[in-house]
Image (cartoon, rainbow, N blue to C red):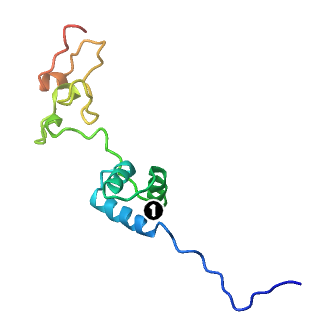
Amino acid sequence: MIAVIVGSTWAPPADPDAALRAWLREWAASHPRRGFRNAYADARGEGCNVNQKKVQRLWRDEGLRVPQRRSGVANVSARPPQDGTPTPAGLSSRSGARNPDFPLPCSPSSTCTTTAAAEVGWSPPDHW
């Protein structure tokens, strides 16, 4: 004999972590530069008894991310003057950095005799 259940429908179980997911989304919106470790610490601090691995999994499942820090952003004080005055020999005001928009008038191994170097008041250093 085979038992057949008539009239029943299968429904997926409700998400037991729905409240924690909502809290994580809200927390991430109010703390954009902090990640799941800080969220876990704050959740524990608010009395939520949750595992760190669960917070990390939900953080990843919700697609929450902390933006990467941008490296190499130039310091405003290290920029060359904006009035169109070229810096000597194509060097920017940062130590030793080359400015590709202003090429060197001569190679470091040769003696500089071009007029471009004289126009900007540049002479080769003594160690060349």
Choose top left, top right, bottom left or bottom right for residue 69: top left
Quick one: label 1, few (<14), some, or many (20+) residues within 10 Å? few
Q: Where's residue 26, x and y in %? A: 33, 65
In this rendering, the answer to whether 20 lies above or below 106 is below
**Left or right: 38, with 84 as reference point:** right
Quadrant including the C terminus: top left
- In percent of the image, x 16 and y 40: which residue is there? 76
Choose top left, top right, bottom left or bottom right for residue 62: bottom left
Count of picture labels: 1
- In percent of the image, x 49 and y 60: which residue is there? 61
Q: Nearer the viewer, residue 2 or 60?
A: 2
Q: Can you name the residue that lies furthest to the right here? A: 1
Which residue is labeled 1 in the image? 62
Q: Where's residue 112, x and y in %? A: 22, 16
In this rendering, the answer to whether 17 lies above or below 31 is below
- In percent of the image, x 16 and y 26: which residue is there? 88
**Left or right: 106, with 10 as reference point:** left
Amino acid carrying label 1: it is Glu
Q: Where's residue 67, x and y in %? A: 35, 51
Q: Where's residue 103, x and y in %? A: 27, 30
Q: Nearer the viewer, residue 86 or 70?
A: 70
In this rendering, the answer to whether 49 lies above or below 4 is above
